[in-house]
Amino acid sequence: MKRLCLVALATILVALQGIAQGQTKMMTPEQREAHKKEMNEQRCKQLATSLALDDATSVKFIDTYTRFNNEMGELRSKYKMHRPNKGEQREGQTTDLLTDAQVEENILNRFALSRSIVDVREKYYKEFRKFMNPKQIQHLYNLEKERGEHL
């Protein structure tokens, strides 16, 4: 009897998880955009707290960091990389499934993306420097790096 209850409970939990996942997939583009904006605001507030910024500086930081994130996102979408179709992709063999021209274009796009990222980071360093000290900015960069490694 105890085993039957455990199996029933596990089945219910799996079903609820499937329902919850299904709901996120059914979001409209407007809902996805609002969710993305809300997550970005939460991330900015979290960073401002972690950097120990006062209220006035936090407002400036959130505005500047949001513009920075938007610009970085635009860069990533500007330099799209060729990828094999999902069914074809196998670990360690992604370039084998692309043509030489596609691989070369990916490499050149990575170079251009890297240059653009450096330009944007330098531009926003100057912006951040207006209201943050270098140690705070370095801490921000370290937090970004940790987040990137985590993702």
Image (tube, grey):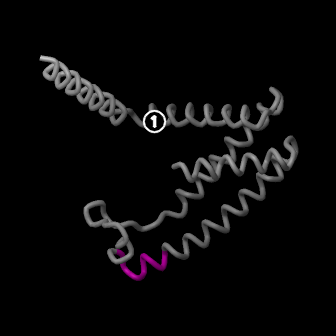
Compare residues 64 and 9 and report the one nearer the observer.
Answer: 9
Q: Is residue 2 above or below residue 116?
A: above
**How many tags in the picture?**
1
Q: Residue furthest front?
A: 2
Residue 142 rendering spot, x and y as whole percentages: 70, 50
**Left or right of 117 on screen, residue 105:** left
**Left or right of 130 on screen, residue 149:** left
Residue 7 rendering spot, x and y as whole percentages: 17, 25
| Residue 118, magenta (yes or no) | no
Q: Quadrant of residue 132?
A: top right
Residue under the point 54% across and 64% down = 79
Q: In this view, does 136 lie above or below 75?
A: above
Q: What residue type is labelled 1?
A: Arg
Q: Is residue 113 above or below residue 41?
A: below
Q: In this view, does 76 lie above or below 54?
A: below
Magenta part of the chain: 98-105
Compare residues 108 and 89 and report the one nearer the observer.
Answer: 89
| Quarter of the picture holding the N terminus | top left
Characterize the local packing of mark 1: few (<14), some (14-19) or many (20 or more) Cα atoms within 10 angstroms. Answer: some
Main SS, magenta residues: helix
**Left or right of 32 on screen, residue 141:** right
- Secondary structure beneath dot 1 equals helix
Residue 36 rendering spot, x and y as whole percentages: 52, 37
Residue 78 rendering spot, x and y as whole percentages: 55, 60
**Residue under circle 1?**
32
Q: In which quarter of the image is residue 39?
A: top right
Residue under the point 50% across and 36% down = 33
Q: In which quarter of the image is residue 3?
A: top left
Residue under the point 69% across and 44% down = 67
Q: Residue furthest bottom?
A: 100
| Residue 104, magenta (yes or no) | yes
